[in-house]
Amino acid sequence: MNPVAKNEGLVVKEVDHELLIYKTDSNKAYCLNETSAIVWKSCDGKNSVEDISKKLSKHFRKAVNSDLVLLAIDQLKTDDLISQAPRSRFEGMSRREAIRKVGLASAIALPIVASLVAPTAAMAVACSSGTTNCTGCLNGTPCCKNPPTCTTTGTCQAGTCV
């Protein structure tokens, strides 16, 4: 089975040799290093793990074994960025054990997928100075004085906005 990357509901931006992927359904952002980015972009259903391994070998001018590709695919699958993937050779192993199995010779190109939860637009709203109500504020944001909280409807509990 050839791996297939998810493409729906994603915002993808290439920055230098890394790939930034934002999942609109979960508000999660992922940063793929160069190795993971090449693997993800190669997961089109046409390339086998061996084909992707050859692409990486050519790109890095160094032999890259298929275990490294499978490790990257496992990480991408864990983060729900792959919709179809071959069975993992690393099931039941910790990441450290899997890296050890891939071998230290590949350490230069180890795949890294870093993720974080991005705030929704509503979470980024803040009251501006001088307003007389807290419309748009979220519960617990410091836009009101005395006490410094807004209600869930976005109005001050008491006092005036900062």
Image (cartoon, rainbow, N blue to C red):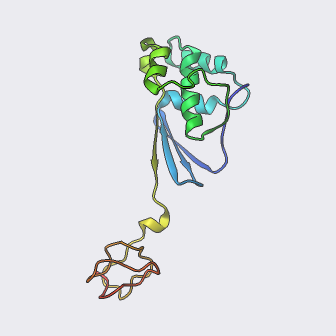
Toward the viewer: 4 or 18?
4
Image quarter of the C terminus: bottom left
Q: Is residue 105 left or right of residue 85?
A: left
Q: Position of residue 92 (x, y in %)?
A: 54, 25
Q: Residue at x 32, y 88 (%)?
A: 158
Q: Quadrant of residue 25?
A: bottom right
Looking at the image, residue 110 lies above or below residue 145: above
Image mark count: 0
Q: Residue at x 40, y 74 (%)?
A: 139
Looking at the image, residue 129 lies above or below residue 52: below
Q: Residue at x 59, y 20 (%)?
A: 89
Q: Position of residue 1 (x, y in %)?
A: 73, 25
Q: Is residue 155 left or right of residue 89?
A: left
Q: Quadrant of residue 155?
A: bottom left
The residue most toward the front is 92
The residue most toward the left is 146
Q: Position of residue 129 (x, y in %)?
A: 31, 80
Q: Is residue 82 left or right of residue 75?
A: right
Q: Position of residue 49 (x, y in %)?
A: 65, 21
